Image (tube, helix red, strand yellow):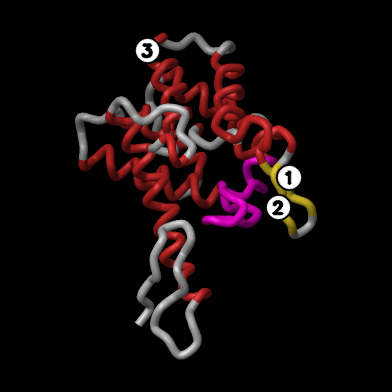
Amino acid sequence: MHLKNLIQEISQPALKELCTAFLKSSDFMRSFIDAPASRRAHHAYIGGLLEHTVNVLKLLKQFSIIYPQSDHDLLLAGGFIRKIGKVDEYETLQLSIDTSDLGKLKGHTLLGYDRLKKELEKIPIDEKVRLKLEHIILSHQGKKEWGAIEEPRFLEAYLVHAADQLDATRFIYSEAKNQVQQDSPWSGVNEYIGREIYLG
């Protein structure tokens, strides 16, 4: 299921307008499609951010079914915008990925927050919904020691973080076969999850 199809499932007009504004920006989408999700940890390649985001939205769509008390539209919108700052954080030069000056000075969370605030100035949106969207970006990394500016303080913010973390960690497990030790069913110790992964 493609990103645009998932965004089309949002029914709340202001949230759909916000997400559609990003989708309709050719400059933003060109950068978004080319961006990696990270430099090394997971989805660290051109197109990685798009792949990771679609996976996260698919998870959030299912979360909204399992947890009907959650706001389906806020989950999808939050899942889409949570890492929009990645388009400013990285520079892709031929086959290498480097962190931009903006990325080094502000990081993708604040860069995404800046992009969101700028776009929200153009859209009439309920103040509580605006605040929740801002919080989702600021808290999507889950814990302050993981880079979150604030930790999730409502259900949808937590679920966005959980889906993000789930897909990133799933990627690490899936790619562990590339780090297998010779004549061993175990990978080396993965620096991001802090343990070996069994591949036998």
| Disc on the earlier residue, 3 or 2 | 2
Name the residue beneath numbered marker 2. 97
Can residue 88 be seen by looking at this rendering? no
Pointer 3: residues within 10 angstroms few (<14), some, or many (20+)? few
Tell me which secondary structure the magenta stretch mostly adopts. loop
Pointer 1: residues within 10 angstroms few (<14), some, or many (20+)? some
For badge 3, the amino acid type reads Lys
Residue 128 drawn at (x, y percent): 37, 12
Q: Which one is nearer the viewer's eye here, 53 or 2?
A: 53
For badge 2, the amino acid type reads Ile
Name the residue beneath numbered marker 3. 128
Q: Which mark is residue 91?
A: 1
- The segment highlighted magenta reads 31-49
Q: Please, is residue 34 above or below residue 24 in the view?
A: below
Residue at horizontal 61 percent and vertical 50 percent from the top? 36
Q: Which residue is situated farthest in the bottom direction here?
A: 183
For badge 1, the amino acid type reads Glu
